[in-house]
Amino acid sequence: MSTKNQQMPTHQERIEMAQNFIDTIIPITALSSGYIDIETTVFISGYTREGAKRGLSRLTRQGFMHEYKVPNMTGQQINIYGLTREGWDYADIDRANWTKQRYRANTRTHEMTILKLAHLNDPKTFYRAKNIGGKHLKSGGFSGGRYPDLMDENGSAIEIELTMKSSRRYVGILHNYHKNKTKSVWFTPEKIAHRLARIFGEICESKKYLKPEIASFDESLSLTRVEYSSIKERIKGYTSLEQIANITELSTLLELYRVNTDLTEYKYKPGIGSKSKKGMVLSLPNGLSIVAKLLDENTKTITELYWQGETPDHIFKP
């Protein structure tokens, strides 16, 4: 059985491939922390693992990168490649050498996801993040404000959200962007995308902020736009009190089903049920009460919600 010989690239083609590798890997590495691992290089370049290693080694020999051995989250040693000053200069960014002292194993997945998503969405449309909302110091730095993960060509803040933060932190972030008239776009895994949309929807409806764009991604990083639903539309699909997540939803539920009750009377009362519990009690006109056990007084995050008295089943019927 004969096999067709694979044509080897010419010398000129190899030069062009090497230059293309430089022009692809260095600018995209410079978009985030300043380093890249082999797995991400394979994803971006389309090379095999061995080909990616050879390409990175060539960048090291040329002085654009430095090779480091660092632990991953399980303690296994892996190779990463950080930009030297020459590498930053090639990317047209004024920064000093990246060193392994800046490496954190627990942020590698996030930092490499930034590079992968930028690659899939055309890295030329993204820019290294700048501080938004901070006070410029004489030293050249900033006090306060926020650095998003990336900026796009329209000046929007790009956030890659792999794990959920507290609602309080999201209020602060969205307030900062709103105050500084900065649009934000969020990329997040499918498993938390709709939860993030729910929280953002509640915050923005309450504070009158512009809702950020949200796109979910799967394991292959394919993107799907996440549509917001109003609180009322969401609650219409609820079937039990246990689905109510916070005071805003409870207020909307009562309004939706014409329970005429002012939630300003929903008083915070420490010690409901036991000394370690904190919660609130809302007395309804029909003699029933709703009890909400809270995580703490400030955030009003509900950990448990139940009726005192006979459950009025009609409240969950259209």
Image (tube, rainbow, N blue to C red):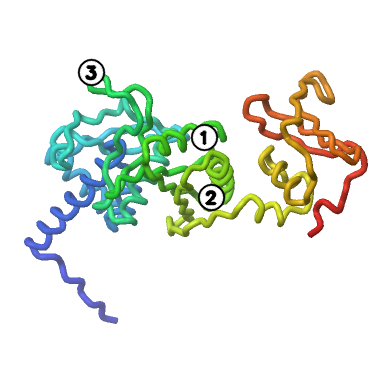
Q: Residues within 10 Å of mark 2 (few under 14, many from 20)?
A: many
Q: Are marks 2 and 1 in contact (CB under 8 Å)?
A: no
Lower sequence index among marks 3 and 2: 3
- The residue lying at 84 percent from left, 38 percent from top is 284
Type of the residue with mark 3: Ser
Type of the residue with mark 1: Val
Element under label 2? helix
Q: Nearer the viewer, residue 27 or 20?
A: 27
Lower sequence index among marks 2 and 1: 1
Residue denoted by label 3:
139
Q: Which mark is residue 193?
A: 2
- The residue lying at 13 percent from left, 42 percent from top is 90
Closest to the camera, between mark 1 and mark 3, is: 1
- The residue lying at 60 percent from left, 53 percent from top is 230
Q: Find residue 14 and report its horizontal and vertical position in percent.
A: 12, 59
Q: Are marks 3 and 2 in contact (CB under 8 Å)?
A: no
